[in-house]
Image (cartoon, rainbow, N blue to C red):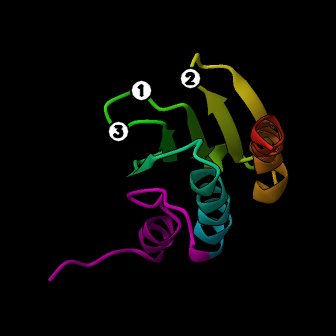
Amino acid sequence: MDVHSPASLAVAQTAVPQRVSFDRRELGVILSLYGRMVAAGEWRDYGLSCLREVAVFSVFRRSAEHPLYRIEKRPRMRERQGQYAVIALDGRILRRGHDLGTVLRVLERRLIRAVDARG
């Protein structure tokens, strides 16, 4: 039987989770935008990665390409610039912030332009 001191138990309970992931609400917001972009013919595939320090939702035009955009969640950035970011194919951070809906607006503007161009 292992005996742990109260201090070691407190550290174990507050330890960083094994993997970062999007919760149900966050996925709902992301998948709503994804569905609209698929309907507009802009996006065709996505990938989801849950790593130790970051969760990434990658968006592809075709499945064999590099992702057009990456939507990242980095909880360690929560107190600084915000835990959510949209990153372009070339690595530029298009928007970073604390609210996922606000951060994703940068991609919604691209949807409006795509619909106007076809309209």
Instruction: Tell me where residue 90 sits by quadrant.
Output: top right
Q: Nearer the viewer, residue 115 or 86?
A: 115
Q: Residues within 10 Å of mark 3 (few under 14, many from 20)?
A: few
Residue range corresponding to the magenta coloring: 1-24
Relative to residue 41, is residue 31 depicted above or below?
below
Q: Nearer the viewer, residue 59 or 57?
A: 59
Figure quadrant of the N terminus: bottom left
> Tag 3: residue type?
Ser
Tell me residue 18's x, y (percent): 38, 58
Q: Which residue is mark 3?
A: 63
Residue at the image position 76 percent from the left and 49 percent from the top:
104
Q: Which residue is mark 1?
A: 66
Tell me residue 7's x, y (percent): 49, 69
Mark 2 lies on a secondary structure that is loop
Tell me residue 34's x, y (percent): 60, 56
> Tag 2: residue type?
Leu
Residue 27 visible somewhere in the drawing: yes
